[in-house]
Every structure is written in C-alpha cells, then in structure tokens.
Image: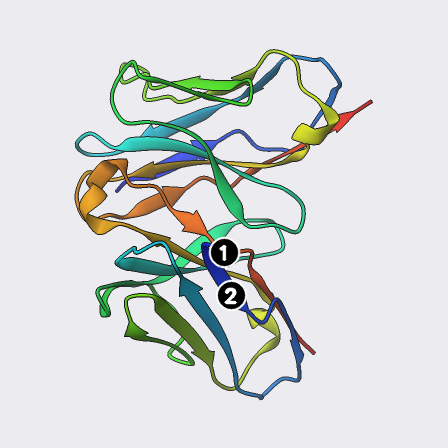
Amino acid sequence: GDSVTQMEGPVTLSEEAFLTINCTYTATGYPSLFWYVQYPGEGLQLLLKATKADDKGSNKGFEATYRKETTSFHLEKGSVQVSDSAVYFCALKTNTGNQFYFGTGTSLTVIP
Amino acid sequence: DTAVSQTPKYLVTQMGNDKSIKCEQNLGHDTMYWYKQDSKKFLKIMFSYNNKELIINETVPNRFSPKSPDKAHLNLHINSLELGDSAVYFCASSHWTSGRNGELFFGEGSRLTVL
C-alpha cells in the first residue's frame, strides 16, 4: 500500500546549520508530495508541495524536490533559525481517492 | 477569520464519560477529516466525509461516531471515554475536486485528557 517513511528524530541543530530531513515514499500511480510543519501547540500547516516528478517546492527558505527515480522528497534548508523549531511531516496524496498518508514526523530543535 | 476551527481546544474529563468535539470550516471545501495525534506526534486518520457522506472509516472503536450535518461541519462524539483516548484530535478539510493538487487545511487541534 501507499506509505511515507521519514527520518527519525529528534534532530538538534545549531542556528545557521544546514538541515536535511529525509523522506521516501511508496505509492502506486503518481502521488503529490507535501511537507507540513507543526509549531508547538498549533495545528499542521502546509510548508511546501510538489505535484509531479522533478518539481521543486519551496517556501521560507525550505525546499524539496520530487525525485521519482529514488521515490524521495527530502526537505532542506541552508541555514536554520531558532524559529524553525517544530515538527515536520512528510505526506503524500494519492492520485485517486483523495487519501493522504503522513510520515511519523521529525522533531527539530534549533539552539542559538 | 479562522479557516478550520475546532471547539473545545482543551477537554479534561473522567473515564466513562461521553464528550463531543465540533469542527467548522469556512473555506468552501467539500471534504473533512478527523485525525488523532498521539503523544509521539504520530498522526492517524480516523474518518473522512465528502459532501456529508462517509468515505474513510479507519479501524476505530465504535465508541467514536462522526456526524456531518452539512459540508462545513464535522463533529466527533466519543462514548465511554478510556485513558487511551487521551490525544490531540485534529480536524482538517480539503477540496475533493482539486484532486492530487489539493492540500489539507488543519484546525488547531483539541487536546483531550481522560483521567
């Protein structure tokens, strides 16, 4: 079945460090891929998305590229800030049935 | 204007009680969802309604009963609450006809604590 596997956390980085959170997926057909972010005490909000192979989603300095050949959608940011501390979820949406599948979430803490 | 709003935000209750959580969206979406997030932040889909019709009904105890009076509302009623029901419950919505491009919009969550 369709699923998403993402890097286990927690991840702790110093401010201005480079961030990568790995995400790989299994899906039939051509899913859309998403990264959601959950700040403490809040709901999830969309960070970025990509709907077809080789698309790059980007927002707030974060980016991820839809790689069909490696079935991956890794999240990257060149220089993290304390305000980026949150839980990050990789997700896919099937191209039939409107079903979403979420990864287990990766907690990121950025220290000054 | 809050796009997806849930009430109450916090709920503390005793085992065995019955409680409800309400959700409303003003985005004009036609599909709504309930997710459960446990203490490890794992998100699990519970139910989904499209145009008031139940389309996703995951393996959830039948003590949980969703109700969708119209496209903009999806409520969750829980009978005979158990300790394991303690979690954060998120309501979400999307537009069915957006297909694979449509994203989910989440509410702020309702934290349920069962004592």
B94 relative to B52 in the view: left or right: right
Q: Give the residue at x 61% y 50%.
A: A42
The residue beneath circle 1 is B107
Mark 2–mark 1 Cα distance, whole angstroms, equals 6 Å
Q: Give the residue at x 57% y 33%.
A: A8
Residue B101 sits above or below residue B18 on the image: above
- Where residue B113 sits, quadrant-wise, is bottom right
Report the number of numbered marks. 2
A72 relative to A104 in the view: left or right: left
- Label 2 or label 1, whichever comes before in sequence order: 2
Q: Residues within 10 Å of mark 2 (few under 14, many from 20)?
A: many
The residue beneath circle 2 is B6
| Chain at tag 2 | B
Q: Which mark is residue A66?
A: none
Query: What amino acid is labelled 1 in the image?
Result: Gly
- Label 2–label 1 contact, CB within 8 A: yes
Q: Secondary structure at mark 2?
A: strand
Q: Position of residue B62 (x, y in %)?
A: 37, 79
The residue sitting at the front extreme is B1
The quarter of the picture where the N terminus of chain A appears is top left
Residue B5 sits above or below residue B15 on the image: above
The quarter of the picture where the C terminus of chain A appears is top right
Query: What amino acid is labelled 2 in the image?
Result: Gln
Q: Considering depth in this image, is B78 or A59 the residue closer to the camera? A: A59
Q: Position of residue A5 (x, y in %)?
A: 43, 33
Q: Position of residue A106 (x, y in %)?
A: 58, 35
- Where residue B75 sits, quadrant-wise, is bottom left
| Chain at tag 1 | B
Q: Give the residue at x 39% y 59%.
A: B26
Q: Give the residue at x 32% y 22%.
A: A71
Q: Secondary structure at mark 1?
A: loop
Residue A63 sits above or below residue B109 on the image: above
